[in-house]
Image: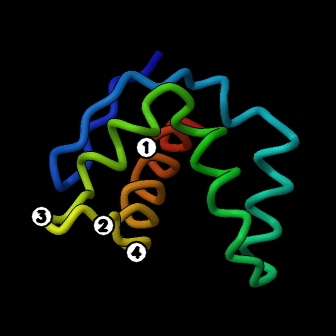
Amino acid sequence: MKHIKTATGFEADIDESCIDDMELFDAVAELQGGNVFAVPTVINKLCGEHKKELYDHCRLENGRVPTQAVITEITEIFTALNAKN
């Protein structure tokens, strides 16, 4: 497990082995190919049980969870997990 803390203060212990997953790789490739519908797969693969916590962290007062805020957090998490590689 690696403790991740993003610039906005989201914290979670994420299993570092989650990045060694072909399905995650496929989803990232789809994202890079322009398929924004792959974002939920990336979130599930990286955050797993912390998905709700992430959404709550990004949630606005009106109850909405901005897509860009979640993508920014996911990018930071992915970068932190890849930092040692």
Q: In the image, what residue occupies the spot 51% across and 38% down?
A: 81
| Front-lying residue, 42 or 85 | 42
Type of the residue with mark 4: Gln
Labels 4 & 3 near each other (Cβ < 8 A) = no
* Cα separation between marks 4 and 2: 12 Å
Number of other residues with Cα within 10 Å of mark 3, as a class: few under 14, some 14 to 19, many 20 or more? few
Labels 4, 3: front one: 3
Q: Residues within 10 Å of mark 4 (few under 14, many from 20)?
A: few
Instruction: Report the residue at 46% width, 54% height from top.
Output: 74
In the rendered structure, are the residues bearing label 3 and label 1 in contact, judged by CB atoms less than 8 Å apart? no
| In the image, farthest residue toward the bottom | 34
Measure the alpha-carbon separation of dots 2 and 3: 7 Å
Residue occupied by mark 1: 80
Q: Are marks 1 and 2 in contact (CB under 8 Å)?
A: no
Residue of label 3: 61
Query: Which quarter shows the C terminus?
Result: top right
Pointer 1 or 4: first along the chain:
4
